[in-house]
Image (cartoon, rainbow, N blue to C red):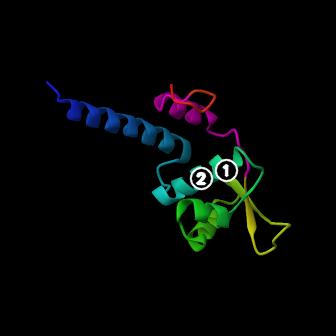
Amino acid sequence: MMSAFDNRRYQTLTRLEAILRQLVAHYGARMTLGELLAVTAAMVRLSKQERVTIAEIAEATGLSKQNLSRWARKRIGVSIMLRVNEEDRRERDLIVIDQNRGSENIEQLARIMKIEADGQPT
């Protein structure tokens, strides 16, 4: 018989495995955890605003702007594009090309994490 701790550990690891499986299905297995964090942080912000900068993603994730810029240049044309920020020409805005791509994976993650459409856990 499993102890309460072992049961909680099993449930946590099972949920984490399901989440990681969905993230790999959405982003592919070749993406690093840092890249995954960058994409997810960008998507979070782009779901509430029209654009996000590399600097904003760096601030949100703790990843360096240099690494994020390198990642963004590598991903250009695949899922994102960069545009010069009209307010500050030194900055680049990150724009997701297809914001609906992978929405079925996001819905599955919401179900795994038991999140309703209003953002509240069930």
Query: In the image, residue 28 lies at what x, y percent?
Result: 51, 47
Q: Is residue 84 visible?
A: yes
The label shown at residue 41 is 2
Please identify the quarter of the rendering in which residue 4 is found.
Answer: top left
Question: In the rendered structure, are the residues bearing label 2 and label 1 in contact, judged by CB atoms less than 8 Å apart?
Answer: yes
Label 1 sits on a secondary structure element that is helix
Q: Is residue 103 magenta?
A: yes
According to the picture, the residue beneath numbered tag 1 turns out to be 45
Query: Would you call the spot at circle 1 few (<14 residues within 10 Å), some (14-19), or many (20 or more)?
Result: some
Q: Is residue 32 visible?
A: no
Mark 2 and mark 1: Cα distance apart in space = 6 Å
- Horizontally, residue 13 falls left or right of residue 50, namely left
Q: Is residue 114 above or below residue 99?
A: above
Q: Is residue 84 above or below residue 20?
A: below
Query: In the image, residue 97 lies at what x, y percent?
Result: 73, 49
Please identify the quarter of the rendering in which residue 26 is found.
Answer: top right
Query: Would you call the spot at circle 2 few (<14 residues within 10 Å), some (14-19), or many (20 or more)?
Result: some
Q: Residue furthest left?
A: 1
Label 2 sits on a secondary structure element that is helix
Query: In the image, residue 29 lies at what x, y percent?
Result: 47, 49
The magenta-colored residue range is: 96-115
Q: Is residue 15 magenta?
A: no
Q: Residue at x 49, y 38 (%)?
A: 22
Q: Is residue 88 above or below residue 53?
A: below
The quadrant the N terminus occupies is top left
The label shown at residue 26 is none
